[in-house]
Amino acid sequence: MPDSGGEPVAASGAVTKAQNPKSAVNDFVVKFANVNGSGSASANGLFARSVMRMGVPVAARNIFPSNIQGLPTWYEVRITEAGHMGRRGGVDLMVAMNPQTWDRDLAEIESGGFVFYDSTKPIPASRFRSDITVVGVPLTAMCNEAYELPRERQLFKNVIYVGALSALLGIDIEAVKGLIADDFAGRQRLIDANFEALAMGHSYVTKHLGALPLQVRRADAVGNRIYVEGNQAAALGAVYGGATVCAWYPITPSTSLAEAFTAYCQDLRVEPETGKARFAIIQAEDEIASIGIVVGAGWNGCRAFTATSGPGISLMTEFIGLSYFAEIPAVIFDVQRGGPSTGMPTRTQQADLLAAAYAGHGDTKHVMLLPADPGECFEMGALAFDLADRLQTTVFVMLDLDIGMNEWLTEPFKWDDTRKLDRGKVMTAAELEAGADFGRYKEVDGDGIPYRTYPGTHPTKGGYFTRGTSRNPYARYSEEGAVYVDNMERLLRKFDTARTLAPAPIARPAKRKTRDGVLYFGSTTPAMHEALEMLEVQGRHLDAIRVRGFPFAQEIYDFIAAHDRVFVIEQNRDAQLKTLLMTEGGIDAAKLPSVLHYDGTPITARFIAGEIAQRLALGPLSTGQAEAAE
Amino acid sequence: MTYILKPQLHHPLLPTNSLGYTRRDYEGSVSTLCAGCGHDSISAAIIQACFELELPPHRVAKLSGIGCSSKTPDYFLGNSHGFNTVHGRMPSVLTGANLANRDLIYLGVSGDGDSASIGLGQFAHAIRRGVNMLYIVENNGVYGLTKGQFSATSDRGSKSKKGVVNTDAGIDMVSLALQMGATFVGRSFSGDKEQLVPLIKAGLAHKGAAFIDCISPCVQFNNHVGSTKSFDYVREHNEAVNTLDVIMPRDPIHVSYKPGESVRVQQHDGSILSLHKIAELYNPANRAQALGYLQARATRGQIVTGLLFVDPEAGDLHDAVGTIDTPLNQLNEAELVPGAAALEKLNAALR
């Protein structure tokens, strides 16, 4: 017995009810607090997928430390029949499996919510809250009784709590079993053992506790959507985009992109007759070598990419500058995270925009694609290679940890078999032989894009020496100022051409006429859409536009011009997208109020709606609000 | 005037090789290096080697980093594609280029500043990956383009033109290449064309990572008394282990060598290296002995030149990666894009 803190609560399995427990069907948040390395990730994933097997969408997010074993880790599952894929904020049921974080985990539960815990060891009443319902299941005791090996005791404890939760929340145990059978197909012993653990938890709750007022009910809201990480989707996009060379260096949160590309290539890109690879993947010695390999392969006519994160971009910057001036196609997947070193790097941010947009030395600007979900990671992952070849430049695909490393429910990938890889302006041996005038950096078509040749094309024509800045349109060495300026002007024309090729923004007009707008991008998207719905209910109407590419399309500037003020929602401290809008579009800062979220957790609808509502209340009412107020 | 094109007129009696190219077809633009620079001699040796090997000039890709040596690819093989990359990073660019098209011949030209200091890591990793290339370091022990700072290959105790003594240990690129697993390692001297040209030819013909450390005195900053990389110092301390000729298989009787004093080594591409012993019995097939020999001679102040090690059966990075025979940059949609039907299956697996 504990020596302080009053009466122990739930020394064995029990439910201690709070006064006004929350009641919800297919709309609540479950958060798992675990110790990493305890095998909880697969059990928690099983829980989330079971809900989807019930036809109810989930939005699940890992919040994990920069560590392999022993530190706190969380997994948040939003159960949302309405299909809100953003993070809601707040927790209705905390599965508190980590004593280290007990107090903060309990504090996070919304009033009227629930805590599920291992009641083997009594916990003093003072460590609970009176406004939450406590559900105790003696998991450790059950495991110790059922299993001999420590490893079994640990792993099956996770499956037991999944069984218990399925009974508490009304998840059909057959749905869970179906998933286990799929996951371990062909390994009957594992299936049986997992079924047994699952039943143990389930029957304990059925016998001793009963169901909670938070319930999952069968629905038909998942449809044919797929459940996939953005990194995996982007990797598959690279396969479909015809990438053959990948050079990379391990860095969270981008590592799984290169690994997924490897797995997909081994599956889809092996020559059937010989078993040989139609790809080359190099784990390089660092990010500098990674981008060097990409630049070399791009120079020589391959579609090549690297996957990295902020620190990698810093290291690659010299090469990115060179490839801008030397006009070499390259694709960089930047899976954004918090700042340097360890810690925040396992958290999400959109904080590399400026670093990527202007990476290099001298005057440089780069194309960026901004996917909002894994579906777009696939699309833009493939498109990036067409754009890099067409524009002969570096193209960034800007994911973030939230999209990249979390599985999202997303529309199935689509591919049009009539689509051709756009290799851009490549002069062939036949064209050279026919007497085409080849100047590697010569403006020919008025779009700023010159023609190139692959090395080894023709015995006497089309060869050139690739350098950074010091050359004339025929790639000959020159240090003439006028020659340099002409070239830089052409590169600006090329950037203007990029404006028309980058993915167009998507507008989402308000239901009522309004002078207020909101501009957002990337992983903010689902939370933004939910926030707009929340604001609409409050009678606050905003037109919205989602940025999907840089350089900004003309529609973006038109949108800003058509509104009195445009909120710019970003997951970084310094308003980097706003900075780009001001710099590239010459827009007055006052017209672009910022809503910034940068604590490393994914932005929530509550946060956005709260911030915007507050600002709207302070400022003049827009037309839409005036109407609502009347 | 910063770019000097050579006139295209050829003397009608210039000899041609079997491809119909004259030596002039292997030249580039006029060198802008200092008169008498060792690097220009190396460029001339490269030109001669390519002409004699009868390489189609456009099938060679020449890559370099930054520095005096890295400027030289502009001065040979004018019809080839060249790439003046960034300082110390040529090896990665060459690696990527090689992955993209395994059918071209890759010549990396670098200097001691470029490869032994800023680029030491990339140098080591390209060698250990077995990238199929000839990597030449034009080694003068000095930063020429920034006017005379020591490089990492400067020997401890050597004196700069300004009288500063180098107190750091020098890096021996040849030993490093051996330790990193290079499958062809040689050293020569820019002023010794008879040794250098065959060495370059053999390196170009070698499959795998071939490395030549070519001592190339800097006429401005490192060719004075007190420098261990001056013309005089190298001439006095040169210990040649062998001389060699490359015999292309279709012309095996082209070269004469003294029976009983030579070792013939058949390389992977079928060419034959013929090594002529002069000083003593030296076996270039033993990596460990090569390292020991280099060390032993170095303690006596001797710079060993010649072909120090060769593995004629070496593989390359493509063998390790298992890439198809067709160059990756020639694959088309059908070979690269799995298509809509395959995607449907992938979607199904994600539900």
Image: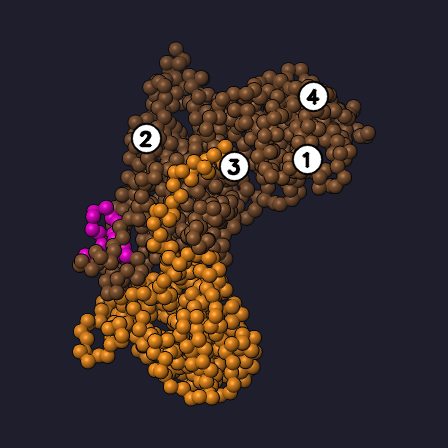
Chain colours: A brown, B orange
Between discs 2 and 3, the one toward the N terminus: 3
Q: Is residue A260 left or right of residue A67?
A: left
Q: Position of residue B257 (x, y in %)?
A: 40, 86
Which disc, if any, is residue A560?
2
Q: Is residue A433 left or right of residue B272?
A: left
How far is the residue under mark 1 from the one under mark 4? 20 Å
Between discs 2 and 1, the one toward the N terminus: 1
Between discs 1 and 3, the one toward the N terminus: 1
Q: Please provide the residue range marked out in magenta.
A: A436-453
Between discs 1 and 4, the one toward the N terminus: 1
Residue at image coords 76%, 27% = A124
How far is the residue under mark 1 from the one under mark 3? 28 Å
Mark 1 — residue?
A: A193
Q: Position of residue B12 (x, y in %)?
A: 17, 78
Residue in the foreground of this view, choosing between A277 and B276: A277
How far is the residue under mark 2 from the one under mark 3? 32 Å
Residue in the foreground of this view, choosing between B149 and A263: A263
Q: Position of residue A542 (x, y in %)?
A: 38, 23
Which disc, if any, is residue A185?
none
Which disc, if any, is residue A406?
3
Task: Indicate which label's residue lies in the foreground, 1 or 4.
Answer: 1
Circles 4 and 2 on the same chain: yes
- SS for tag 1? helix
- SS for tag 3? loop
Label 1 Cα crowd, 10 Å radius (few <14 / some 14-19 / many 20+): some
